[in-house]
Amino acid sequence: MKINALASYQTGEPVKDYSFDPGELQDYDCLIKVLACGICHSDIHVIDNDWGNSRYPLVPGHEVIGEVVELGSQVRHLKIGDRIGVGWQMSSCLQCPDCLKGNENLCDENQGLIISGYGGFADYLQVDSRFAFHIPQGIETEAAGPLLCGGITVYSGLRYAGMSSGQEIGVIGIGGLGHLAVQFASKLGNSVTVFTTSQDKAEFAHQLGANHVVVVPPGESPPLPTRLLDIIISTVPASLDWAAYIEYLNSDGTLTLVGVPDAPLTLPLFSLLSKRRRVMSSPIGGRAMMVEMLSVADRFGIKPIIETFPMQQANEAMQKVRENKVRYRAVLKVS
């Protein structure tokens, strides 16, 4: 069969029509009719070859929601007609220590959907079914895609930093990642403090469930803390006064970064040592964590705030993402 898609043919180029033959369906593969696909800043990075591993023609889209239309001979956990989702990761070795511990996202052989394959800016997607996930009935199709990237990124980052409930959680940034982090932390029974840059974002943070907000104007440092936090998650791609944020951590507190700063971190060792504080980072999540995240999102009504666009307006939608004008996740719909 031929899959009709939108692809970037050269570095930084807008997408245009492209068709390809996905090849024979392998034993564990599934073929999905695409219903919706989110647009992430990572799609832009890959189109622009910012990480040096892009290949062209490049079909973007790694927040894919669709309906199963065909299954490989060994697929048992899916059936025709199921609504499923595919995120950043398309495969791993499934045999190394990380994979066997449920950390497929940490596998040395893990492959990104739009790095090693073709993404969801298409009418169909063929992918390893073992990296496709049932979407719970209570999650709307258009809202589900961003959970598979932004949602799993913040959820996994918080969980591996030790988040449970009854804790004090800090969230730096209230954008595409941050607005989901606030929801997960607050709806799981934690007190949330948001660090943001303006008063209007502070009011929005309260609407999402934040208990406290600290306004930190761009380029400035946060004030001295009046309350200490168990975990701070940074969702912003910027360099901040990390030493000042470390002072907000309680004993055994953790700073976890899921936004990638534009410069190396500079941290005072004594501030870490004196209170046994930790710094970590986290990429997406393994398959078990993905299933848990989707279940929590369904049970507690956690969903991204999205703007939708028809698939034909992919370039216009991506330009809005480039300019940070989307509030807060962009999603392409297949008509």
Image (spheres, rainbow, N blue to C red):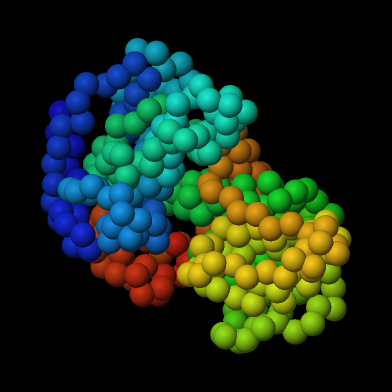
Q: Is residue 29 visible?
A: yes
Rendered residue at 47%/35% (across/down): 108
Residue nearer the viewer, 88 or 266 = 266
Q: Residue 290's spot in the image, x, y percent? A: 56, 39
In the rendered structure, the answer to whether residue 228 lies left or right of residue 52 reads: right
Residue nearer the viewer, 263 or 192 = 263
Residue nearer the viewer, 135 or 197 = 197
Rendered residue at 41%/27% (across/down): 129
Q: Is residue 166 above or below residue 261?
A: above
* Number of numbered labels in the structure image: 0
Q: Quadrant of residue 191?
A: bottom right
Rendered residue at 36%/75% (across/down): 323
Q: Is residue 172 above or below residue 47?
A: below
Q: Residue 123's spot in the image, x, y percent? A: 24, 42
In the rendered structure, the answer to whether residue 329 lies left or right of residue 5 reads: right
Q: Quadrant of residue 33?
A: top left
Q: Residue 254's spot in the image, x, y percent? A: 74, 58
Q: Residue 232's spot in the image, x, y percent? A: 71, 63
